[in-house]
Image (cartoon, helix red, strand yellow):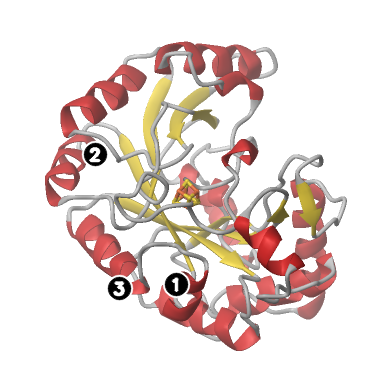
């Protein structure tokens, strides 16, 4: 369900003593640092659309979905629905292996809610991915209210033999916001899911959106502080994207809610303040997502992910602040 398509390469060679020193001096811990603690080689995520649906669309949790969501923004071309998990992975591998023949891969179950099925069906899909050559583990994107104990018990067993990271779409710690965006769960569901996942020794990530309707800096920093109390391993931050055809686009046009209109530099400053409140044990995977240009209403920053990250890196270096210095 996380609405992004990570295609960044992550060098994951083991750290040397000097590398560790360099890591300690980096302003924040990134996803490459996290992966290097788990892999001796380069690893690349391959996004999969396994044909799941979403309980916030089919009536189980709600109808209409989250107000900002348009699932057409989710997937790259190689993971078109209709292809098997194996076919999507092979296509993804072919795409990346042209440049990096020795790359290993993580199967990223990304589109919609990737734990929303009977356990037998989930096991079959996850294990199909794991028998594909060079696939070294799973990343499973889901909602915090869609992980029964029975599934986590299975993932606990699986994580003893392979890399497993469960990524929850939390979006905000503010329950009023979560209700406003028709999220269908509250912050307490995120806390509960994270604790049940962590207690089983399974790696756990969160996905958050900055700039949700009517939120301001006070709300963003409250979410940062709430996340800092949780045993999460990774975090993705995204700017709210106003996408055509969504209920949110309609609400904004009708002036029913207000969303932030900010420049990339203003958003960067908020990301940095957020980072300062996060303990260093949490690796930050990304700060922005990019919806297809033909669907995006705002913000129109015209920056690729790496350009945005470079700009943030320059800004945080210039400020001389680091992740966790206010946690
Ligand atoms: S949970 Fe929300 S964001 Fe995720 S697929 Fe469903 S409607 Fe979209």
Residue lying at 37% horizontally and 56% vertically, measured from the top left: 62
> For the image shown, how many numbered marks are present on the structure?
3
Label 1 C-beta lies within 8 Å of the nearest ligand 1 atom: no
When asked about the image quadrant of residue 24, the answer is: bottom right
Q: Judge the density around disc 1: few (<14), some (14-19), many (≥20) Cα neighbours within 10 Å.
A: few
Q: Which mark is residue 188?
A: 3
Instruction: Identify which residue, 56 or 116, lies in the foreground.
Output: 56
Distance from label 1 to label 3 (Cα)? 13 Å
Element class at badge 1: helix
Is 100 situated left or right of 66 in this image? right
Q: Position of residue 112 (x, y in %)?
A: 45, 40
- Vertical arrangement, residue 277 with respect to residue 315, above or below: below
For the point 51% across and 12% down, the residue is 90
Q: Is residue 173 above or below residue 162?
A: below
Q: Residue at x 70, y 76 (%)?
A: 258
Apparent side of residue 262 relative to residue 248 in the rendered image (left or right): right
State the separation of the CA atoms marked 2 and 1: 33 Å
**Given the current orientation, which residue lies at the most extreme front position?**
254
Which of the two labelled residues, at mark 2 and mark 1, occupies the earlier sequence position?
2
**Which mark, by number, is residue 159?**
2
Say whether residue 63 is left or right of residue 253: left
> Which element carries disc 2, helix, strand or loop?
helix
Identify residue for label 1.
179
Identify the element where label 3 is drawn.
Answer: helix
Going from N to C along the chain, the mark reached first, 2 or 3, is 2
């Amino acid at each position: 369900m996380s609405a992004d398509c990570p295609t960044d390469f992550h060098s994951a060679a083991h750290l040397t003593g000097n590398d560790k020193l360099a890591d300690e001096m980096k302003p924040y811990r990134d996803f490459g640092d996290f992966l290097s603690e788990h892999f001796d080689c380069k690893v690349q995520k391959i996004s999969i659309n396994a044909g799941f649906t979403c309980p916030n669309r089919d009536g189980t949790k709600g109808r209409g979905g989250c107000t900002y969501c348009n699932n057409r923004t989710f997937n790259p071309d190689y993971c078109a629905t209709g292809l098997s998990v194996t076919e999507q992975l092979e296509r993804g591998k072919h795409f990346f292996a042209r440049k990096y023949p020795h790359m290993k891969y993580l199967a990223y179950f990304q589109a919609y809610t990737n734990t929303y099925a009977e356990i037998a069906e989930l096991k079959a899909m996850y294990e199909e991915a794991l028998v594909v050559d060079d696939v070294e583990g799973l990343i499973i994107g889901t909602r915090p209210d869609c992980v029964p104990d029975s599934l986590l018990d299975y993932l606990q067993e699986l994580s003893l033999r392979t890399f497993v990271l469960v990524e929850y779409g939390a979006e905000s710690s503010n329950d009023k916001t979560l209700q406003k965006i028709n999220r269908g769960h509250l912050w307490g569901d995120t806390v509960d899911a994270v604790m049940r996942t962590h207690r089983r020794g399974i790696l756990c990530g969160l996905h958050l959106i900055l700039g949700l309707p009517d939120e301001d800096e006070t709300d963003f920093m409250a979410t940062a502080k709430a996340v800092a109390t949780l045993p999460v391993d990774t975090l993705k931050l995204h700017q709210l994207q106003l996408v055509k055809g969504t209920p949110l686009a309609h609400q904004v046009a009708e002036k029913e809610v207000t969303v932030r209109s900010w420049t990339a530099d203003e958003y960067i400053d908020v990301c940095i303040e957020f980072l300062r409140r996060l303990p260093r044990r949490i690796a930050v995977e990304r700060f922005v997502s990019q919806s297809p240009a033909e669907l995006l209403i705002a913000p129109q920053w015209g920056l690729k992910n790496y350009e945005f990250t470079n700009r943030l890196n320059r800004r945080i270096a210039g400020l001389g602040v680091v992740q966790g210095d206010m946690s």
